[in-house]
Image (cartoon, rainbow, N blue to C red):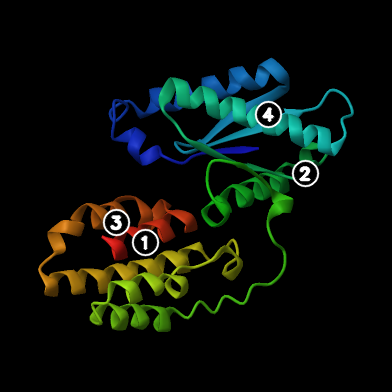
Amino acid sequence: MIICIDNIGTILEGPWKKDNELLSFAIGNIVEEIVQQQYYGNTFCISMEEYGIIFSLQQAVGRTELKNKLLSLFMNIGKCLWEHLGIHISGGLSRIEEGIFALPAMYSQARTACQYRFISGKGKLITYDEIPVIYVNNNLKKAERVEYLRQVLQTMDKEKIIMSLSFLKIEENEVCNTDIESVREIFEKYTWVLIEFMQKQGIIDNFEPLIRHFYSYLLKQGSLKELNEWLSMETQL
């Protein structure tokens, strides 16, 4: 299992700004203490925002039962990290394999599952098998979407602008796990169009907090849901 800190940027701007090593130790200590209460396992720090857990199962457990137990464990970890450190987490869970030689593949699976949170949504434990394996035609119509936003803004028709969101927003079934960077690229171009429009209308100051939020967080860490919600706020204010 891999635990990812979803709000690491906000956390590092707070009281822990000058004490990153202590923060990492505190997170790892909380995770390890909870794990050891229920399982024999090893917790290790991958980076400031990622922590891995290797479980050693002492007895045979059905896959469904095990998944439910690990989900409960994940929720407990999330609850404690929030209560003690104000941290929000997502998680990725690999397939259940045996033997030390399976660890590299399991790590890759867990990390891939955790990255899928940017598509399916944050704050939950995602198993590797939940990731769609079907091919997604990732023709996201980048140029068409950006030009459509530019044209609809020029109408100055609030109702048309709101209706345009059905085409401008990107849905989960349009993308796969590797498309999040392309999605963020589209939303960055949306931002350029919106900034250009706001400057011409003399209303850029009204939207400055939302624009700052995009560049400080959403451009690198935003999930599909968060990006779509941001676009709704930008076009309806």
User: SS at mark 1?
Assistant: helix
Q: CA distance from mark 1 to mark 4?
A: 34 Å
How far across and how far down the image is residue 113, in percent? 63, 50
Front tag of 3 and 1: 1
User: SS at mark 2?
Assistant: helix
Q: Amino acid at mark 2?
A: Ala
Task: Answer whether residue 61 is visible to the viewer in this image.
Answer: yes
The quarter of the picture where residue 97 lies is top right
Residue indicated by mark 4:
72
Residue indicated by mark 2:
102
In the rendered structure, are the residues bearing label 1 and label 4 in contact, judged by CB atoms less than 8 Å apart? no
Classify the position of the C terminus by image quarter.
bottom left
Among the two numbered marks 1 and 4 on one chain, the one whose residue lies closer to the N terminus: 4
Q: Amino acid at mark 3?
A: Tyr
Residue indicated by mark 1:
232
Q: Amino acid at mark 4?
A: Ser
Classify the position of the N terminus by image quarter.
top right
Crowding around mark 3 (Cα neighbors within 10 Å: few <14, some 14 to 19, many 20+) is: few
Among the two numbered marks 2 and 1 on one chain, the one whose residue lies closer to the N terminus: 2
